[in-house]
Image: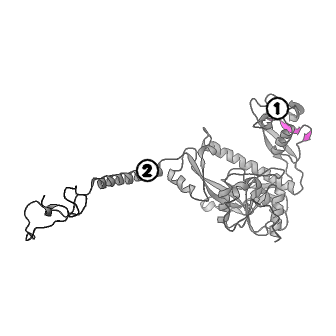
Amino acid sequence: MPPWERPKCCAQGEQPRCQAWATTLPPGAGAHLEGPRVTLFAPAPRRRSRARRVGWAFLIGAVVLGLLASLLPSPYLIEVPGPVYNTIGTQQQGTGKDAKDVKLIQVSGHETYPTAGALDMLTVGIQGDATNRPSWTSVIRAIFTRSQAVIPVEAIYPSGTTTEQVNERDSADMQASQQSAVAAALIQQGNDLPTQLEVSAVQEGSAADGAIEKGDVITAFDGKSLTTNADATSLREAVAQHGTSRPATVTVERGGATKELRVTPRSEQGTALLGVGVTERYDFPFKVSIRLQDVGGPSAGMMFALGIIDEITPGKLNGGKHVAGTGTITADGEVGPIGGIRQKLYGAADAGATVFLAPADNCDEVVGHVPDGLDVYSVATLDQAVTDLQTIADGKSTAKLARCGS
């Protein structure tokens, strides 16, 4: 090869490695060089072509994965903040010309008093159900959204459970929580309520199977009366205290007759149980109706009870402030834990609440997830919730009130 045809950047005898080809022309050749054509640029190395192919493959793969993620259902559900309802306010019910605002808590047969501000109950919205699941794209987005949470489908829809069955269960839980809320509010105000604990189910193979029957009304357990200010929790606690080492005396009303049955509770997951389900029935001194529609679950019990107390007592329980809260309630005023506390915190803040009452048993989920501008107080009983609200309403120091994490 003549020297003017070799790459300028390469020594004689070496393989060409540079991309730019330069030519050294013999004297006088100028632009009239004859012979092989000399290019100024060499073809791209093979590794560049290979890299380009890999890049295109990666891009196409990413596009395909993105499309699949947006279309394929995931095995998860997404919890988001749901609608907020003021228990001392109204809810719009009906559609079109028939739509009207209906007061959530209605009392007849007892004097009521003006209320102000809000005592919000909170809900959690669920994206997806037993058959329709959110996409992977939605799940990934929810993971990085503070107000949302990703949960397995089985957490709400166990295997073989339909959406309709879960909705029916939630509706029954809401009805039961409303009954318990009315009972808790009236007992907290000093009323004695005649109570019936009617057996609604007997678990097959349980301690009660063959002794207690569906339809029995349990009136006492080991001599402790369950006919006044009692509920399912009262029975459950009495059984747990008795233990499993000896028979207990269960007094029931059956067909107009009183029977004393000997039943030895059995241990299930470390707890003494009879193996019965009971329905609580109360004889209220006046009528309280809760007119909330299209909401299920038991978690509004405490806020319903506070709303009832505010309606039937002078003054403003919340001092006219915007208060929100959540928690189950028993007739004897015990506040229980709920699900979706993080979503409810954000739902309360978005609705404008400045005070939040959280069940003490949910405190570990509250810490680190409190939105700005929201003061969260920990409550274990209805009495404590009432005292906290009165302290806040009166403008007194809240330093001694229980808070999550303190």
* 1 or 2: mark nearer the eye: 2
Q: Which range is magenta?
A: 215-229
**Residue displayed at 86% across by 56% down:** 188
Indicate left or right for 82 with 220 as reference: left
Mark 1, residue position: 212
The crowd level at tag 2 (other Cα within 10 Å; few <14, some 14-19, many 20+) is few
Toward the top, the furthest residue is 210
The crowd level at tag 1 (other Cα within 10 Å; few <14, some 14-19, many 20+) is many
**Residue displayed at 69% across by 58% down:** 122
Amino acid carrying label 1: it is: Ile
Residue 327 location, quadrant: bottom right
Is 62 one of the magenta-colored residues?
no
Mark 2, residue position: 65
Q: Earlier in the sequence, mark 1 or mark 2?
A: 2
Is 228 one of the magenta-colored residues?
yes
Instruction: Work out whether residue 329 or residue 308 is closer to the camera in this orientation and state it.
Output: 329
- Report x, y in % for residue 155: 63, 45
The C terminus lies in quadrant: bottom right
- Between the C-alphas of marks 1 and 2, the distance is 58 Å
Asked whether residue 92 appears in the rendered view, the answer is no
Instruction: Work out whether residue 143 or residue 347 is closer to the camera in this orientation and state it.
Output: 143
Task: Give the vertical position of 256 relative to 365 (above or below).
Answer: above
- Disc 2 secondary structure class: helix
- Report x, y in % for residue 254: 85, 33
- Disc 1 secondary structure class: loop
Amino acid carrying label 2: it is: Leu
Residue 80: assigned label: none
Indicate left or right for 162 with 135 as reference: right
Instruction: Work out whether residue 284 or residue 242 is closer to the camera in this orientation and state it.
Output: 242
